[in-house]
Image: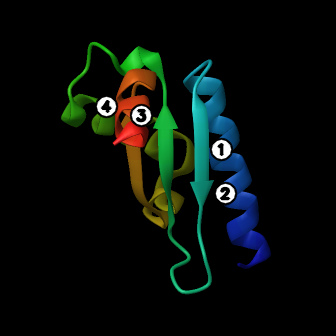
Amino acid sequence: MSALEISFLERLTSLLSEYFQGAKVELSSNVLSPRINGHIIWDGFCDKDSAERQLLVREVIRERFGIEASMVSLLLTLTTQEYEDIMSD
């Protein structure tokens, strides 16, 4: 992972943690695929469907980072209950 990617990963984590107050934000990338993926666990997603959640996250990232937003591959957007349900299966 290059210094640029680490810097972007840190900046992205900071942005998402600030915007989605109280969220658990876990992001990563690797040598084989430098694009960033991860998840955001936030109870503020409770009243939003999957498409609304993704649109919100993408807009927040695009507004702050512009073209750098293309470095983000996949971010799962879950509520605490959804995450717990997945982990218990």
Earlier in the chain: of badge 1 and badge 4, it is 1
Which residue corresponds to mark 3?
83
Looking at the image, is mark 1 or mark 3 nearer the viewer? 3
On residue 13, the disc is 1
Q: CA distance from mark 1 to mark 4?
A: 17 Å
Image-based side of 45 in relation to 38, left or right: left
Residue, x 23% and y 34% (percent of image)?
50
Position of 75 relative to 88 (above/below): below
User: Callout 2: few (<14), some (14-19), or many (20+) C-alpha neighbours within 10 Å?
Assistant: many
Q: Are marks 1 and 4 in contact (CB under 8 Å)?
A: no
At 48% from the left edge and 56% from the top edge, which residue is drawn?
69
Q: Earlier in the sequence, mark 3 or mark 4?
A: 4
N-term mark: 1 or 3: 1
Gap between marks 1 and 3 measured at Cα? 19 Å
Q: Are marks 3 and 4 in contact (CB under 8 Å)?
A: no
Dot 3 and dot 2 residues touching (CB under 8 Å) = no
Mark 3 vs mark 4, foreground winner is 3
